[in-house]
Every structure is written in C-alpha cells, then in structure tokens.
Amino acid sequence: MAHLPRRAKSANDWTETDLEAYNIHLRAEDAATFFGTTELPQSPIGQEVLDVEDAHDIKNDDSANLVKYIGGAMRGEEPAVLPFVPTLLTDTGYPKDGQLVAQRNDFPFFVCGEWRHARTGATLFDPGETTTLLVVQNDHRFGAHDGEDDFDDSDSEDSDSGYLNDRDPNPQLVAAVIAAFHCRNLSRELSGRRAVEPKVMPGLVMAGTLPTFFKIPITAPLLDAVHEGTYPAEPTIVSMHIPDLPNPDRWREGMKPLENRRHILRCLEAFRGFVQDYTD
C-alpha cells in the first residue's frame, strides 16, 4: 500500500508489511498450476532414498548420508541442518556444468538508498556466468538450531536482527532474491558483462525438510522501487506452492515418511526443470 512506511532494513527483517509496502503479493497455487503439469516427473535420486526410510538400512553411502541429514534436519541437529540443502540439491541434480551450491550467503542489499544485508541459507550459482540461479531461505521458526546464534549479527543502527530471527521467512526470501539479482548484475557490469534481463527467479523456503516453492518476478520497476523506497504502480505477484502431502498429518516430519518423501522429491524434480529453464 502506498501509504505504508518504507525504510532501509536488512532482508532478514522483512515482514508481510514490507511486501505490501512495495506492492508485492503472494499467491498460493496448486501443483498443476505452479508446475504446469498434472503429472509430476519421477526423481532421478537413488532408489534406496525412495524406498528405505532409515539410513542404517541403506547400502549406498551417498544415499545413506542424505537420509541421515533428512532425519537430523527435522530434529534441528546442527551437523545435519547445515549440509542438508546443499546435499539435497546436489543429489537431485540441480547443479550442472560447473554450477555450485553455497551455504550461508551474504548479499549486499540496496534498499531505500542505503546498503543493508541479505543473508540466505543457500544458493545455487554459476561462477562462470556470475549469476545466482536459486535462493534458499530456512524457516528458523521450525525446530531448535542450537549453535547458529553465532550468526546473529546486527548490522545497522535501526537494530536489524541479522542472520537469524523468528519471522515469517517468505518476505525474507523475496527480499533476498531481489538482493541476489541486483548484486550479481552489479558484478557482471563491473566485469564488463551484459546485465541479466529482469525475469522470474526461483526460490525455496525450507521448514526442516519440507520445502515451499516460489517463482518471484524481478522487474525493473520493482528494483527501482526497492532501491528508491517508493511504491510501484504495478503489483508483483509471487507464485508459491506448498506440496500437497500424501500423509498431511505427518507434515512436521517433512521428508521422513516415505510417501511424503517421494512426493516432495517429485516436486523438486519438476521445479528443477524451471530452474534449468531460468539458466538457459
């Protein structure tokens, strides 16, 4: 809304009010609408991950490690929380042709004429092309992540809370995607490369091991509005999809139950196609 206050604040301090202040709206979609198909593709992941619930019963080391991380991440165990997303994305074939998955990125975020921070759980990026392909934000309201307090870091005079907080992660993801897109384009311009044209960027929010999928349009008017602290005339509609789990009563267990694991992995495979389309 045009009358809402807009101020320079880190991406991790964004709330629903900040989305409204920049005319950004989240729209939930079913799988067919979001992924563009009524038949989700099969995951290319190892068969044991699809068929065996307990890591101790899995013979393949890579598959066993992923399933261990699934269990540990759902319980908020620090050694599992940190590597879970990079391992999941790698094992499901997201990085290609020299692309990398990095943990805990910190992007400069230019908002309301001032520089702040945008900290993410993980990103998929192409170092050769200097482009960010996927941004992942963790839902820190989910589980107890002991030991992550070291990353709480106030970086502005208005008491930005830094890396971790208990806010809704969806606005944080949107802000981080805006920051990542702008930051990578600045890097490309400084190296003499053509800036990437505004387009729809993919994003994920992970609540333990349960993902929510996002398609976030990045447009020139939106970038200008955030940079200048103004209200854009045209709305930005962010599409999002929460998987329709076969066993919804066990949603807090994320990918632990096999039937839910298989469905989530099929959603990830369908989303991988969108991420790859974005990179081409």
Image (cartoon, rainbow, N blue to C red):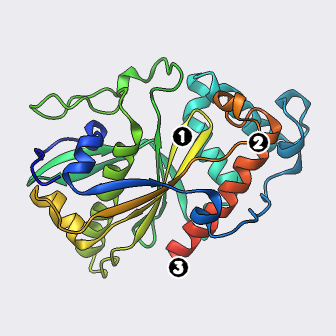
Q: What residue is disc 1 on?
A: 206
In percent of the image, x 24 and y 57: which residue is there? 23
Frontmost of labels 2 and 1 is 2
Q: Is residue 199 left or right of residue 68?
A: left
Residue 211: percent from left, percent from top: 58, 44
- Mark 1 neighbour class, 10 Å CA radius: few under 14, some 14 to 19, many 20 or more: some
**3D distance between C-alphas at marks 2 and 1:** 18 Å
Which is nearer the eye, 8 or 171? 171
Image quadrant in which you'd find residue 32: bottom right
Q: Position of residue 51 (x, y in %)?
A: 89, 42
What's the residue at 17%, 52% (across, down)?
1
Q: Is residue 220 above or below residue 10?
A: below
Where is residue 262? Give x, y as percent.
79, 47
Relative to 243, residue 257 above or below:
above
Pointer 2 with pointer 1, Cβ within 8 A:
no
Q: Residues within 10 Å of mark 3 (few under 14, many from 20)?
A: few
Residue 57 image position (x, y, % from top left): 91, 31
Q: Is residue 133 visible?
A: no
Q: Amino acid at mark 3?
A: Asp
Query: Pointers 3 and 2 in contact (CB under 8 A)?
Result: no
Callout 2 amino acid? Pro
Q: Secondary structure at mark 1?
A: strand
Report which residue position mark 3 lands on. 280
Disc on res. 246: 2
Q: Nearer the viewer, residue 206 or 3?
A: 3
| C-alpha gap between disc 3 and disc 2 | 33 Å
Of pointers 3 and 2, the one earlier in the residue sequence: 2
